Amino acid sequence: MKLLVTGGAGYVGSHCVRELCSAGHEVVVFDNLSAGHPQAVDAKATLVEGDLADEQLVDRTLASGGFDGLMHFAASLDVGESVREPLKYYDNNAINTIRLLQAMQRHEVHRLVFSSTCATYGTPPSVPITEDMPQIPINPYGHTKLAMEWAMRDSAEAWNLGACCLRYFNASGASADGWIGEDHDPESHLIPLILQVALGQREQISIFGVDYPTRDGSCVRDYIHVEDLGVVHRLAIESQQPGKFRYYNVGTGVGNSVKQVIDAAREVTAHDIPATPSPRRVGDPAELYADPTKIMAELGWKPKYTDIVDTMRTAWQWHKDHPEGFA
Ligand code: UFG
């Protein structure tokens, strides 16, 4: 297939591009490089540097022809920032996505895989989270992602768009061969921050909340390996039919607490990793992990990484070899 991948230079996007290229697909990456890294883009892919707000460039790129489908990763993704600057999220995640859908309609591209998020569920009534639970986001990031799921569902009815919304949990890890990994600026994600402590770049890691009603008082999340996400995206686009709207939770089905993640890092790095109990972070639900039964049954997918120690090992290899990230 010939595929356009927005945000293909970012963390999850670049791992998916590698998976697509190694499966023989022809990939054009569209990325404004505000958060992505050109070095992360597979050499077999073509990189178009541009912003989704540039309608003419999006049009010209799609007009270059022959696209069978599109994967849409490009988005702002910091939940806390979305609370402080909601309009940035409505602009980047909602308006730009609507423009992209309009361009797909104009150019008759009818297959889409969309990076959605478990944040669309807000605080779920129970765990593990199944797809039929109510979607009631609790922050602007989740609102914009959910609104775009609706736009895609309505487009499937109205103009035969085929869309698969992948609601993923906490993307983590790095490529097994150590070639690409996680590099955000500023970094806010738990695993890279912990590994910065092991590298001596930061003194300690704060545990945001130790009084949650969980097994050890710290928050529980589902850490899904980024290469497993790559395989899911490939299977989703390969099986996507025009006019069909699908949605799946993408996680391991295993929850790990912040303290367990820190312990895994201690085991892998052989570093003490001092950790300090700290106040809760606003907007953090106590426990989020997926029930991945639906995607496993319908796409025939199974996560390769289900043990946080194995995921941590790949992340550590990347951070150890790239202490300054892609720089
Ligand atoms: N945490 C700490 N200390 C830190 C950083 C994080 O204890 O210094 C905790 C958080 O409170 C949370 C867990 O580690 O319980 C994971 O936090 P991350 O910031 O790594 O990830 P989030 O779960 O907040 O966010 C991720 C994605 C979002 C997505 C969200 C869905 O980054 O894009 O999952 O819940 F929306």
Image (cartoon, rainbow, N blue to C red):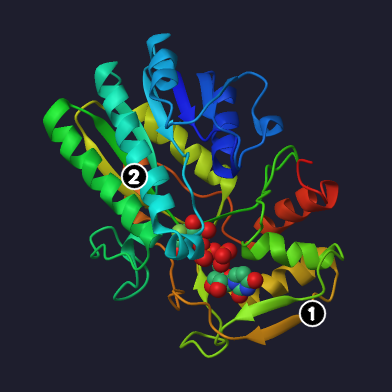
Amino acid residing under circle 2: Ala
Q: Give the side of residue 184 with respect to residue 213, left or right.
A: right
Q: Give the side of residue 141 with respect to residue 194, left or right.
A: left
Count every numbered label the image shows and give the total: 2
Amino acid residing under circle 1: Pro
Residue drawn at 51 percent across, 44 percent down? 229
Does the residue at mark 2 contact the one at mark 1 (Cβ under 8 Å)?
A: no
Residue 220 visible? The answer is yes
Task: Report x, y in % for residue 320.
Answer: 83, 52
Task: Report x, y in % for residue 41.
Answer: 64, 29
Q: Is residue 159 above or below residue 249?
A: above
Query: Secondary structure under badge 2?
Result: helix
Most extreme residue toward the left, as rendered? 158
Q: Which disc number belongs to residue 274?
A: 1
Residue drawn at 56 percent across, 82 percent down? 218
Q: Name the residue under label 2.
A: 94
Q: In which quarter of the image is residue 140?
A: bottom left
